[in-house]
Amino acid sequence: MKPFLIAALAATALSLTACEENLGKGQPLNVVSGHIVMGATPDRPAVGYFRVEGGPVPVELVAVTADLAQRVEMHESVKENGVVTMKPLFRADVPAKGELIFKQGGKHLMIWNINPAAVRAGKLPMAFVFTNNNNERILFDMPIKQASAAGADGSAATAPAAMDHSAMGHGEPADAAKK
Ligand SMILES: [Cu+2]
């Protein structure tokens, strides 16, 4: 066998492998970053933020789960008549080659009763469930921050994100909401 043919076969094998991993066409659908902020007090839920990069086709995020937490919900903060409320969110679009962002003041996760071992370890393994490929699940370890460290990203220098969030009752006024 001639060297160039071997190289061609090797390249074919590589590209097949890449296809199987959904890397064939540009960037794959992926969870690229995220973190959890613990509640200001143990009885309050933690909140989670993250960023998903879209793959070659549009999909929807339909659930986020964690074996080491009692409950996880997707929420969206919406302003109606000057009042910020949170509503459960059951699906969120991830445009092809676009992004889906859960962040403070917008879409967010609420997480109840994270296993203390996960808190000590500083990360919560989460599964992001999408509509493609028969509900593809992408696993991502979310780093856990204490409420007091919430300002580290510069988004909440004065009020920790979790505290701000927990002051925001479902359907109740939230004057703590930031502009
Ligand atoms: Cu919420």
Image: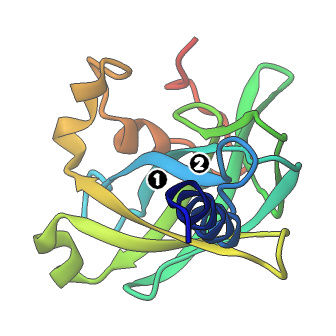
Q: Is mark 2 within 8 Å of ligand 1?
A: yes
> Which quadrant of the structure image shows residue 127?
bottom right
> Which quadrant of the structure image shows residue 89?
bottom right
Disc on the earlier residue, 1 or 2: 1
Residue indicated by mark 2:
108
Point out residue 56 in the picture as x, y percentages from the top left corner. 82, 47
In this rendering, the answer to whether 85 lies above or below 37 is above
**Pointer 1 local density, CA inside 10 Å: few below 14, some 14–19, many at least 20:** many
Residue indicated by mark 1:
48
> Which quadrant of the structure image shows residue 78?
top right
Viewer-nearest residue: 78 or 115: 115
In this rendering, the answer to whether 172 lies above or below 91 is above
Point out residue 152 in the picture as x, y percentages from the top left corner. 22, 27
Residue at point 45%, 53% (across, down):
47
Q: Which mark is residue 150?
A: none
How much space separates mark 1 and mark 2, taking CA atoms? Answer: 6 Å
